[in-house]
Amino acid sequence: MALQSRLFKDDKKLQECLIRDSAHVTPGSSGDHVSRIQTALALLDDARIEQSETLTKKYGPSTANAVLSYKQRRKIINFSYQTRADNIVGKMTIAALDKEVVKLERTSPVKDIECQFGQQ
């Protein structure tokens, strides 16, 4: 199933992340897809991501820490090969983020969410 949130659904790289292991989003990545992940983490977990990373849309140390924290709080672990959460956005993580963002979009005023997503 494709990503459903307004934040993620139109992003090809994030859609790929949902279905392909080779498309995981990892530290060192950069681009609009990283910016969308940063936005979701800020909205959902009040993550504090370094301004230098948000301005450059870079998956740096503070983004990696925010991803790890998000996954630890929700126990997002692929037990087929992991014993603890990591700082990579893969299939399970992007699906969880999308599900929570959809819920937020449905419960928050549309205008407020769009402004937070930078889609004024």
Image (cartoon, rainbow, N blue to C red):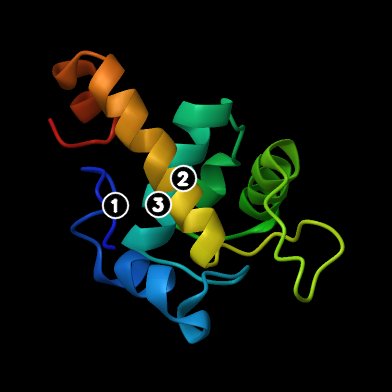
Q: Secondary structure at mark 2?
A: helix
- Quadrant where the C terminus is found in the figure: top left
Ranked by sequence position, the earlier of labels 2 and 3 is 3
Tell me the tag on residue 81.
none
Residue carrying label 1: 8
Percent from the top left, x then y, of residue 17?
42, 71
Seen from the viewer's position, the closer of residues 80 and 21 is 80
Q: Secondary structure at mark 3?
A: helix
Q: What whole-number distance in Å separates the C-alpha atoms at marks 1 and 2?
A: 9 Å
**Label 2 with label 3: CB-CB less than 8 Å:** no
Which quarter of the figure has residue 26? bottom right
Q: Nearer the viewer, mark 3 or mark 1?
A: 1
Which quarter of the figure has residue 92? bottom right
Q: Nearer the viewer, mark 2 or mark 3?
A: 2
What kind of residue is marked 1? Answer: Phe
**Label 1 with label 2: CB-CB less than 8 Å:** yes
Query: Which residue is drawn at the image coordinates 38% and 46% (left, top)?
Result: 98
Residue carrying label 2: 97
Residue carrying label 3: 35
Q: What whole-number distance in Å separates the C-alpha atoms at marks 3 and 1?
A: 10 Å
